[in-house]
């Protein structure tokens, strides 16, 4: 991170098992003699090169087949943060090994999301890599595995492979093609690459142990045939490496020291180590080899993080796209008004462990409130408007009232709020027959108009058909203006918000809430779509104080009493910004 204001992912006094692992390696000088040829490559490329200036190398390796979500933020913060803290470098790498699901749109979105979170992959973002850059090396290494008798071409169908793989209580059955000669395997593999075979007709498998208690070691697939165009390499390849094969090779070629991944890859670690050890023993990879370390993923309640589920939400129009502010995607969170600082604070508070658990959505909201409270200027918005008429107000007069831009930051100054004879107030701030403890406006009662005058309610009008109050009347006390010597002359128990009807502007305001009604969507109902919150988005029309008309997309504010809001980059027009509610002032779900 280049921003000095960006907090570390953890306090300096906090440790965890990954940091301890790194510190042990540094103290022992485990990677001190590694060499770096200036770019990724096999052992020969780094031989004779200078000592690697990076004390450690980590990487963030997303697949470019979707938008990043908040769960990815933990991996981003961990990999980039640890590299920075220990004098290292974090690589930005796209694992683009599946040509049928990858799009440039997702590549651009991922890069933008990582930048928005405050991170860079080198001083000039020079450490940007793609798995597809290494396809030739991966192919060459596969040929070496075949030549050493450690891989073979299997011509069983996918169903046959699954049927002979075994399970946790029964070992697998060796393929009838496992004993193919090296020469035959090399010929078939070359033909696979040349596009001479149909999808699914052959796979290249590692030859390890079909009786291994770890199913991932039972001759896992290394390459499959996919006669598909790749968004970077075009039609150059007809075979593509499996992720489990490509990933460790990518790490080794890039000189990665600590390969951090989530717990679902723990069972894959023996194969990770087996593959790299084999290739290093052939002389193709530099030692010491990368080491895989697993940690628990970031799971949040009241949402889903599965790419398949998120894509379904978008494709079936349950939400308004990947950047819908209700989505847990980074682009959605950003549009909603979540801050990168708040997301990094969440990661810091969640910490690093090897135990999977769910973090309450309210923790994320609290982190956002904590950050927004410091950075958001205060403004007034009336979201459920009711007309208030001051009958004794001087005709045509406009009074300038002063309101602080931030009550805890006097150096931010004050802003003028025009007051006139007609105002908008919140409907809930008037009650015809006040209940016990209600101190806002009611017939005969006095309240203070915040930053303005004390007023006394003298009457109100109602719609004869609906019985709904349409207008409230009052008189103001001229000597009670806030900030003047007479302000405290009249004591009142209630204060209400307002904007001038003649100076405010109408704006659409989107009130966003949690996308699902249950903590774990689908767990009890059987289908996560059944738990969608139909009230998760409400668009209303409010009246906002004049300075808000100058807000630019992405500007955030606290609408006093209502919560934190952000000017939307899609719905806003020049001079007429529309706002999204980022988060309420307090957690309203704890009382539901």
Image (cartoon, helix red, strand yellow):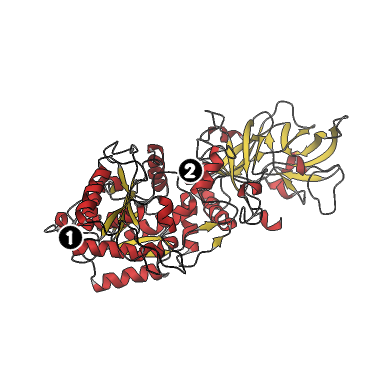
468 or 478: nearer the eye?
468
Which residue is identified by label 1? 35
Label 1 crowd (10 A; few <14 / some 14-19 / many >=20): many
**As drawn, 414 above or below 75:** above
Q: Earlier in the sequence, mark 1 or mark 2?
A: 1
Which quadrant of the figure has residue 479?
A: top right
From the top left corner, tell me how far across and down residue 588 is, in percent. Answer: 67, 53
Say what secondary structure mark 2 lies in: helix
* Residue 539 horizontal side relative to residue 376, left or right: right
From the top left corner, tell me how far across and down residue 578 is, in percent. Answer: 58, 34
Residue at the extreme left: 48
Can residue 6 be seen in this snapshot?
no
Number of callouts: 2
**As drawn, 141 above or below 468:** below
Image quadrant holding the C terminus, namely bottom right
Say what secondary structure mark 1 lies in: loop
Which residue appears at 32% of the width and 68% of the height? Answer: 22
Whether residues under marks 1 and 2 lie with C-beta atoms below 8 angstroms apart, the answer is: no
Residue 125 is marked as none
Label 2 crowd (10 A; few <14 / some 14-19 / many >=20): many
Can residue 329 be seen in this snapshot?
yes
From the top left corner, tell me how far across and down residue 409 is, in percent. Answer: 53, 51
Which residue appears at 73% of the width and 31% of the height? Answer: 422
From the top left corner, tell me how far across and down residue 561 is, in percent. Answer: 66, 47
Marks 1 and 2, Cα distance to the nearest angstrom?
A: 38 Å
* Residue 162 horizontal side relative to residue 570, left or right: left
Residue at the extreme top: 396
* Residue 182 horizontal side relative to residue 199, left or right: left
Which residue is identified by label 2? 331
526 or 349: nearer the eye?
526
């Amino acid at each position: 991170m280049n921003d000095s204001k960006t907090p570390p992912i953890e306090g300096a006094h906090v440790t965890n098992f990954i940091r301890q692992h790194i510190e042990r390696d540094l103290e022992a000088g485990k990677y001190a003699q590694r060499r770096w040829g200036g770019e990724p490559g096999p052992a020969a490329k780094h031989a004779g090169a200078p000592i690697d200036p990076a004390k450690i190398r980590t990487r963030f390796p997303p697949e470019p087949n979707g938008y990043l979500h908040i769960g990815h933020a933990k991996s981003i913060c961990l990999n980039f943060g640890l590299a920075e803290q220990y004098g290292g470098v974090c690589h930005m790498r796209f694992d683009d090994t599946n040509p049928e699901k990858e799009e440039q749109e997702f590549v651009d979105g991922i890069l933008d999301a990582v930048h928005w979170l405050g991170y860079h992959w080198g001083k000039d973002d020079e450490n940007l890599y793609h798995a597809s850059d290494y396809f030739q090396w991966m192919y060459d290494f596969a040929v070496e595995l075949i030549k050493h008798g450690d891989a073979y071409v299997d011509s069983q169908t996918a169903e046959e492979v699954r049927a002979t793989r075994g399970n946790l209580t029964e070992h697998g059955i060796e393929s009838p093609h496992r004993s193919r000669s090296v020469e035959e395997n090399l010929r078939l593999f070359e033909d696979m690459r040349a596009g001479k075979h149909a999808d699914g007709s052959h796979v290249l498998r590692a030859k390890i142990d079909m009786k291994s208690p770890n199913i991932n070691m039972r001759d896992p697939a290394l390459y499959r045939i996919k006669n598909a165009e790749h968004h970077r390499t075009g039609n150059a390849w007809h075979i593509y490496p499996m992720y489990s094969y490509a990933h460790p090779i990518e790490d080794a070629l890039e000189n990665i020291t600590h390969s951090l991944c989530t717990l679902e890859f723990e069972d894959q670690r023996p194969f990770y180590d087996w593959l790299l050890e084999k290739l290093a023993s052939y002389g193709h990879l530099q030692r010491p080899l990368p080491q895989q370390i697993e940690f628990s993923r970031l799971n949040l309640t009241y949402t889903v993080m599965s790419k398949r589920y998120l894509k379904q939400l978008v494709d079936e129009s349950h939400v308004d796209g990947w950047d819908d502010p209700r989505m847990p995607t980074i682009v959605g969170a950003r549009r909603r008004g979540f801050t990168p600082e708040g997301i990094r604070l969440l990661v810091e508070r969640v910490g690093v462990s090897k135990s999977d658990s769910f973090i309450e959505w309210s923790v994320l909201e609290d982190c956002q409130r904590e950050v927004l409270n410091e950075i958001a200027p205060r403004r007034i918005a009336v979201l459920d408007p009711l007309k208030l008429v001051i009958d004794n107000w001087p005709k045509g007069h406009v009074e300038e009232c002063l309101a602080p831009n931030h009550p805890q930051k006097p150096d931010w100054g004050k802003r003028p709020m025009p007051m006139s004879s007609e105002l908008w107030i919140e409907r809930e701030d008037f009650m015809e027959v006040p209940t016990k403890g209600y101190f806002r406006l009611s017939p005969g009662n006095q309240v203070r108009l915040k930053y303005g005058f004390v007023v006394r309610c003298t009457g109100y009008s109602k719609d004869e058909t609906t019985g709904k109050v349409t207008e409230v009347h009052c008189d103001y006390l001229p000597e009670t203006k806030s900030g003047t010597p007479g302000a405290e002359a009249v004591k009142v128990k209630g204060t209400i918000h307002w904007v001038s009807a003649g100076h405010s502007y109408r704006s659409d305001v989107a009130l966003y809430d949690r996308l699902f009604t249950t903590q774990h969507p689908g767990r009890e109902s059987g289908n996560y779509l059944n738990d969608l919150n139909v009230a998760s988005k409400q668009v209303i029309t409010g009246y906002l104080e004049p300075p808000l008309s100058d807000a630019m997309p992405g500007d955030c504010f606290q609408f006093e009493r209502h919560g934190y809001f952000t000017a939307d980059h899609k719905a806003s027009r020049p001079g007429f910004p529309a706002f999204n509610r980022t988060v309420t002032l307090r957690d309203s779900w704890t009382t539901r």
